[in-house]
Image: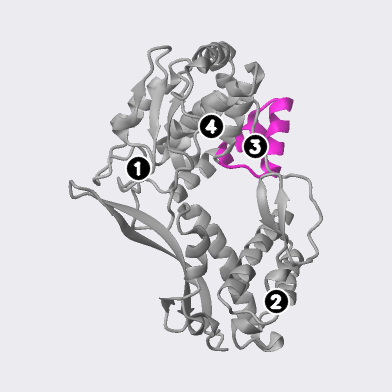
Amino acid sequence: MSNNNILLFESKSSSFKFIAIPIWIDYLFLNNGEVKKKQLTLIGLKNTNLNVHVIHPLSQFIMHYWGSRKYNTQRKYSNNIVKFLNYLLENQGQFQIESLQDLKIVHGDKYLNSLTVEGVRRDTVRNAERTLVYFYKWLVKEECSIHFDTNKFEKKQGQYGYYYESPFRPIYPEKKPNKVEHAFPPSYIPLFLEVAIAVAKPIALGIYLQFFGGLRISEVINLRRTQVTRSMNKGDFVFKVDNQHFRTDIKDHASVKKVRTQRVFQIEDWGNILLNDHLKIFKPIDQTNALFVNQDGKAMSQRSYRQYFEKAKHKFIELLISHGDSEQKLLGQHLKYMKWSTHIGRGTFTNLLAEYAENPYEISQPRGDSSINSSLTYMNSTERLHKKIEEKFSNLHEHYIPKLIDREGVHE
């Protein structure tokens, strides 16, 4: 790649800004004529007045380090470097930057400190710093730096392998108390399911899969209707979790973290009822055969799923605060204050497993951290865990739910 292609820092005009651009490419051609697609994130330069953009040669930075990695990884680093480049554009006159050759270590420090001033989290600054280390080192490799060289990047041995020490010395934000809730008491799962059925029915089954199988949102919306099978014991669901690329027409791409076969516990026949109802009511009209669809019958996006989840979340909190006893009101106020979203299902499922697990493997295996078929050694322990969890919920559906639901209907 020619230095001339990446040195020029473009116009000082405020009508230009860097952007992260998601694109789809055909990357695998099968003998049967099928074409496999792959999503990438590239760096672009946009003229905001004309609303047009071009792919910028700096995309090579992303491809050099993360070209073979998953889309979400590429997007994270692309967004990080785009924010830094736009910061340089905004301060181009002050920093006297005509090209990337003018870039100095101090510019990186100033950017990282600006993030701290904005009030972002400590982890966000750390993540941005790691991206800058890669970027500055890449500029050295491409012979685009005159104010720093390889001596600025000392290679060290860490716990997980070698890494390059950061040349930056920013001021990090103070550590703050965690305001993210990762789980709530399992006894409230039936109530949350009832609320979801009432106000967010298109994803009620998905919420069940998250709370009793530990599935992530991206894994739920990548399921096909034909993928569910049943295990011989207990009638549990078994799903093939894989990347389906249902919605190549939108930027909101859902990528599966780990392709695997995943088991979801069948508790009190709730899953059976939810699945049968879901298959009858929600049918795709496109060619995806997606299990979860939006109101137009197309494969559901993460954004749509989150919108339904937020609706159920707010109604659930309202029900606890307005009609619950003192314990329920307290939980409602706590959940109203804390941040939580779809991942709370996986967290609550983990807590359920941890309550009865005898070793870490009994938690990791049902969560899908390893394949359900990878070791038959743990199948018996999974059956024992299932039995314990089912016993825990055996009376809740009869006695706990009506205590709140019957006071005031949640249907809208």
- Crowding at dot 4, Cα within 10 Å, few <14 / some 14-19 / many 20+, comes out as some
State the CA–CA distance, disc 4 to disc 3. Answer: 18 Å
Task: Residue at the far left: name it.
Answer: 32
Q: Amino acid at mark 1?
A: Val
User: In front of the other: label 2 or label 1?
Assistant: 2
- Which residue, given by chain and number where applicable, does mark 3 sit on? 182
Is there any visible trace of residue 207 in the rendered image? yes
Residue 167 rendering spot, x and y as whole percentages: 74, 67
Residue matched to label 1: 293
- Residue contact at pointers 1 and 3, CB within 8 angstroms: no
How many neighbours does mark 3 have within 10 angstroms: few (below 14), some (14-19), or many (20 or more)? Answer: some
Asked which quadrant contains residue 76, the reply is bottom right
Distance in Å between CA atoms under marks 4 and 1: 27 Å
Q: CA distance from mark 2 to mark 1?
A: 52 Å
Tell me the residue that label 4 is attached to. 369
Query: Which circle's residue, 1 or 3, is located before the other in the chain?
Result: 3
Span highlighted in magenta in the image:
313-341
Q: Which residue is mark 2?
A: 148
- Looking at the image, how many numbered discs can be counted on the residues? 4
Indicate the quadrant where residue 7 lies: bottom right
Question: Does residue 187 appear anywhere in the picture?
Answer: no
Q: Nearer the viewer, mark 4 or mark 3?
A: 4
